[in-house]
Amino acid sequence: MFDAGLVIDWSARSTPSPKTPVADAIYACGFTQAEVDHPQYFRTRHACFAACITAIDAALARGEVFFLGFDFSFGYPMGFVPAVTGQADAKSIWHYFKRHVQDGQDNSNNRFAVADQINARLSGVGPFWGCPANQQFDHLPHKGSARRDHGFGEYRATEIASKTAQSSWKLFTTGSVGSQAVLGMTYLAKLMDRYGAAAHFWPFDGDIPSRGPALVVAEIYPSLFSHPSDADLRRRYDTEIFQIKDACQVWRTADHLRQMTSDKWQGLHSGYNITNPQIQAEGWIVGVPCGPTP
């Protein structure tokens, strides 16, 4: 189904990750239909994105269908995007963040300030919450329990269906996928600007192209493809990077996508209706079964 691809476990770190690979950092793993590459470790988002561009450009030049998967939310619960951007298109929030988020070469960023500014524009308190104890914002509470009357659901339909995915409103402490999304969506906008019609963002742009050159960008959740034991990877490659769970998970996800066929894709998303308004508004995680259409 995909000629090649790259899957990325993202990070919202505010400083470069250590030189030696550690958990909760950026890991990427490429694949072709023939094999899965060795996972790569990146210290900054800018370095990772540069590697993405290099891989995409090469694949499109070869006329391939290239899959690019990111481990962060591509959307928000129903109603949020039009409330912020004034547009129904779910992707408009990506360009909003591109205009407002500052993400430096050294990972320094203003994500908490941007979330605070959004909260200030909306009713009630929230929906975003969480920041370091030594930082204070007028409209960004430290605790989720301090929010009220903001009017948005806590989870997207795909997060509910996954049963384990975290809320995109959470910006700090363990499981703060919200920060990864705020920073990550700026790069989705950059991909839109660079590749135009060649970029296909699933599920927002409909069914996946069957032939290239095409870039397919989709939301992944690497823990969906985790394995009870990664000892086999450690034996096979005998390298320290597979001591890191994140590296193992991107390898497993890449291997899963390497073997993907159209029939397997349809089977993964049984019950999925790509035109459903909630899916179009919120997005969907690759590999999360839909069951009854939300």
Image (cartoon, rainbow, N blue to C red):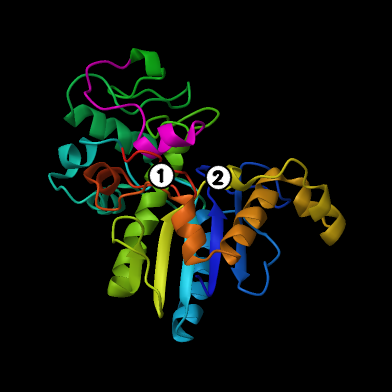
Q: Which residues are magenta?
A: 147-165
Describe residue 288's horizontal placement relative to residue 193 as left or right.
right
In the picture, the disc for residue 15 is: 2
Residue placed at 33% from the left, 29% from the top?
Answer: 128
Residue placed at 32% from the left, 41% from the top?
Answer: 293
Q: Earlier in the sequence, mark 2 or mark 1?
A: 2
Which residue occupies the foreground of this view, 90 or 11? 90
Outermost residue toward the left in this view = 86
- Up-down: is 48 above or below 163? below
Which residue occupies the foreground of this view, 252 or 142? 252
In the picture, the disc for residue 62 is: none
Describe residue 100's horizontal placement relative to residue 35 as left or right.
left
- Up-down: is 141 above or below 206? above
Residue on which the image places disc 1: 73
Which residue occupies the foreground of this view, 267 or 256? 267
Q: Residues within 10 Å of mark 1 (few under 14, many from 20)?
A: many
**In the rendered structure, which amino acid carries the disc numbered 2?**
Thr
Badge 1 marks a residue whose secondary structure is loop
